[in-house]
Image (cartoon, helix red, strand yellow):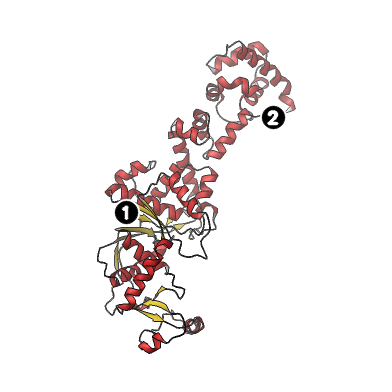
Amino acid sequence: MYRFAPSPTGDMHIGNLRAALINYVCSLQDNSGFIVRIEDTDKERNIPGKDAEILEILKEFGISYQMLYYQSKNLKFHQEFAAKLLSEGKAFLCFCDEATLENKKQIAKEQGRAYRYDGTCEHLSADEVFNNPRPGVVRLKIPKDADFSFDDEIKGRVSFESCNFDSFVLLRADKTPTYNFACAIDDMLEGVSCVIRGEDHVSNTPRQNLIRQALGYNSKIKHAHLPIILNAQGQKMSKRENSSSVKWLLNQGYMSEAIANYLLLLGNKTPCEIFTLQEAKEWFSLKSLSKSPAKFDEDKLAQINREHIRQASDARLKQLGFTKPELARFFTQEASLITQIKEKINKIYSPKIIDDEWQANAKIIKNALLELVENKSLPDDFKQLQNILSQKTGLKGKAFFMPLRLLLSNASHGPELSQLYALIKDDLKEILK
Ligand code: GLU
């Protein structure tokens, strides 16, 4: 079972989408199933409506799932498991107040060492625990022989020094679970067998494994941590950068097929450059992913977008708002984004902007053209059209070509007119109106 576990705390980041896509493709390969879990336990950071937005994006990308979970619905399990760990002596209550902990963190900082919880409450007497007036947090007891290493499907063996880990918090004083506790339990309850997520979670994996071990869960969960995505300057792509937001990319005019293609291509060795999700299912392997960070290149995405527009079916292009699919494909020679291409097409059908210099001749050519339209005698071939018009109007050279171009394309330079003519011939009446 694979899963995608987004937090509804902001716009979906391309790193999240990449994780969703890869989990989904892997689940299609081994048929083990795919679930989505909205990790909504951080009430302060949740943004209303972001869950629906994430689900909408998954739909748009053709990612379907067997089950949809909301982490907050598992709260009673999180609390019950915390109680179980406490009763078995695998976790303990800690009553240290914020100010004391803050002070210890400060001292550690001044001494130039990383702060780790010092175990103050690990050995309290029963009396100290039961008569404590403060609400306690639940911390995990780290076994002496705890193993902090694991095998990563991309990185290979990942090991951490035990000094990096302390008795971390499982349940806060308000009885809500921390991310690691909720995530470890939910993956266990939901039967997840492979976790593929961003590299920023790599140090959470030993913690989550320790939690499940403490709970006596022995089924092996495989892990793969995806290298981070860098921007053009080589820095980690922050949530604030426009192009890191999936919604922004879609609004910008990138097709979901192209974004998916690009994200599966990123930092990967693939048998071809342009492919669909279904095609990727045939050959995708975590093993081909690079261990190093990948650089996000918007120009490359634009080029891939162009290819996907060219290859899209008429039905798909119509769904994207192109009433004339062939015109959309035609304009990929000039533009890569759906929005840019729509602008170019709309321009043809909009009132013509013609310089004074060409006004008079344009009027003559337009009338001649309209006459051909009325008589249903427009030739199929553009060369032939030029000959007929030139004869009819007595115009030639630039005085003929420029106004003709302006009438047909509403631009003084642009695509090959003979090709364009074939595509708009049947609309000339509308175009010249
Ligand atoms: N909610 C976490 C995130 O969005 C999930 C991480 C995970 O996949 O475990 O980063």
Rendered view: 37 above or below 57: below
Q: For the image shown, how many numbered marks are present on the structure?
A: 2
Tell which of 30 and 87 is nearer to you: 87
As drawn, the residue found furthest toward the right would be: 356
Tell which of 10 and 418 is nearer to you: 10
Find numbered disc 2 in the image and state the secondary structure of the residue it sits on: loop
> Splitting the image into 4 quarters, where does residue 429 fall?
top right
Point 48% across, 60% down: residue = 236
Q: Amino acid at mark 1?
A: Leu
Rendered view: 310 above or below 59: above
* Any part of residue 101 in sight: yes
Measured Cα–Cα span from mark 1 to mark 2: 54 Å
Point 63% across, 14% down: residue = 389
* Any part of residue 120 in sight: no
Q: For ligand 1, which image quadrant applies?
A: bottom left
Residue 427 spot, x, y in % from top left: 58, 22
Point 54% across, 45% down: residue = 251
Q: Amino acid at mark 2?
A: Ile
> Splitting the image into 4 quarters, where does residue 353 fall?
top right
Decide if residue 127 is on the left or right side of residue 317. left
Which residue in the protein does label 2 denote?
Answer: 353
Q: Is mark 2 within 8 Å of ligand 1?
A: no
Find numbered disc 1 in the image and state the secondary structure of the residue it sits on: helix
Q: Nearer the viewer, mark 1 or mark 2?
A: 1
Residue 28 spot, x, y in % from top left: 31, 47
Quick one: label 1 or label 2, which is nearer the N terminus?
1
Q: Locate the N terminus by quadrant.
A: bottom left
Tell which of 10 and 107 is nearer to you: 10
Point 28% across, 48% down: residue = 31
Which residue in the protein does label 1 denote?
Answer: 286
